[in-house]
Structure formats: C-alpha cells, structure tokens
Image (cartoon, helix red, strand yellow):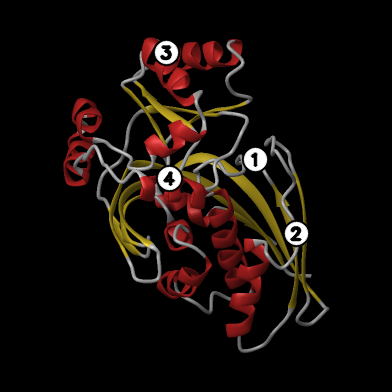
Amino acid sequence: MKSVIERAYAKINIGLSITGRRDDGYHLLSMVMQTVGLYDSIGIYRTNDRYEISMDMDYAGSHPEEEITCDESNLCIRAAKLICSLLPESHGYYIHLTKNIPVAAGMAGGSSDAAAVLRGINAIEGHIFSSDQLRAMSVSLGADVPYCIDGGLCLCEGIGEKITPIDASLKTHILLAKPPCGVSTPAAYKWFDCHPDSAGGDINAVIDSIRKGDMKGIRDNIHNDLEDAARHLVPSIPDIEEIMEEKGAILSRVTGSGPTVFGFFSSEEDRSAASSEIKSKGLCTDIFSVEALTPDYAHEAERK
C-alpha cells in the first residue's frame, strides 16, 4: 500500500484589505499571509477500492465546539475527488486527519488540509502535477487553498488565487490565542458588508517594513478589514489583545475572519508571560507559541 504523511500548516494574515466585490458575491482581497509552525497531520493511503474515498479523524490538540463531518462536504474528501478525477488512472484513497489547528479560527485549517491532500496524492502518483497546476485546480475548493499548496510569506490578491511570494523573512516570536467560540467566515463578511467602513492600512508599507525588519512599520501600517466584525462576534478579543500588549507585544491583531488573535513579541519571556496571563484569565483554551516558516515546510513529509 502506497502512503504518505503530510503536514498541513496554519497561516496568519498580516493585514487583510477588502478591495471590492465580484458580481458572483466573492470579495476581492489584498492580504499578506504567513505560514506558522502549527499543523494538522494527514495520513493518505492508496487502497484497492477503486474510486472510493473515505476518511476519519481525531482531535489531538484542538477543542472544537462541534465535530467535523467526514462526509462529501469535507474539504479533504472534495480535494481527493478533484485530483483523482484528473489522474490518468484512478485509485481509492483512505485519509486519516489528526486535527491540531482549531476549527473556525481564521487560520485556514480546512484549506491547508485540502492542500495537503492534493500534495500527498500527487506525491503518491509520482508528482504528475506541478505546484502551479495544483494551485490552479485548487481554486474551486476555496480562496485560501491555492496559497496553502506552498505557503510561506506571500501577497495574496483577487479572491486569494493571485499569489506573489515576498522575498523576506519574518523574524519574531508569535503567540496565537483562540477564544473558545469560532467565527463563521460568511458571518464575518456579512457583518462587514453591513458596516463597510475600513480603517485603511497600507499593505505595500507592511511588505516594505517586513523586508526592512521594521516591526514598528508593520505595526503602524497593519490592518484587517474583518477585525471589527470578529470583535463584534467575539467580545473577548479586545481583552486578549490588551493582555498581549500589556505583556510586551509589539502588536496584536486578529487573523483572517477571527477569532484567533496573534501577537508579535521580541522575546520568548514576554510571549510566555502573555500566554500565562491569557490562560489564567480563562480567555482561551487554545494557545500556541509558534514561529514563522519558509515554504520549505510544505514538502516535509514522511513518505513510504
């Protein structure tokens, strides 16, 4: 039996601007995305049951409000069926997902899982498709999936399918804190549509500041157009951000549609103090100390 184990890494949005809306309702975006060292583990096994795709999962490190279904609506199943429909010879696949990235957290957990399934099946089948081809086919699965094929530090535009790698590295200690409840991405966008005022921000200035290693420049120019929506839906978010900043965070913001808050810290001591305080206040059960990753991580796998 051919198999592969892929890591599906989480991401954070270092800025998110909504630049318009298409006729089909999709919002147009300009985002700086960064992969971080929190990941789901996905075992993908080729079976003798031609055309049959099945999966199960366990929740090793996440605390979902409700369990994820493993039926036809699951992005992993959809990704497997998509790539299998394009292979010259079809096989069955069994997928086992170990979930560590919190659900409905604004960290692209489901999208990264789908991207990992595409990478894994492609590897088992002999790398028939290039990364560009995997990204092209993944657009139909969701806005974040094309980015998650390779990840790293990128500017993502359009509905997420226009990806430009940024030739820089983010050097900071990152703390992720997710409140117990999740945020539905459609609900966040719906709230924004009813309250479309944006505080601005400057994506290009954020990118320039990252290249220069200027954390103050990042802080002064960063903005997430969905942050107000997340704060409205999860009132504890400002308290989490305040604790991070009181404990020395250079900045703290919501990632994606929330409700996860990320903080950038200059020292491990400050990050640890913020983590302990957030836990002691009972604001979050899912708290992670992570670092920014380069695209090399996307091809880390145990293949056998």
Element at label 4: helix
Residue 235 picture location, percent across and down: 50, 26
User: Badge 3, how many Cα within 10 Å: few under 14, some, many 20+?
Assistant: some
Amino acid residing under circle 1: Asn
Mark 1 or mark 2, which has the lower sequence index?
2
Residue under numbered circle 4: 191
Disc on res. 270: 3
Pick the front one: 33 or 196? 196
Mark 2 or mark 4, which has the lower sequence index?
2
Is label 1 in contact with label 2 (beta carbons under 8 Å)? no
Residue under numbered circle 2: 70
User: Badge 4, how many Cα within 10 Å: few under 14, some, many 20+?
Assistant: some
Amino acid residing under circle 2: Cys
Amino acid residing under circle 3: Asp
User: Badge 1, how many Cα within 10 Å: few under 14, some, many 20+?
Assistant: many
Residue under numbered circle 1: 100
Say which quadrant the N terminus sits in: bottom right
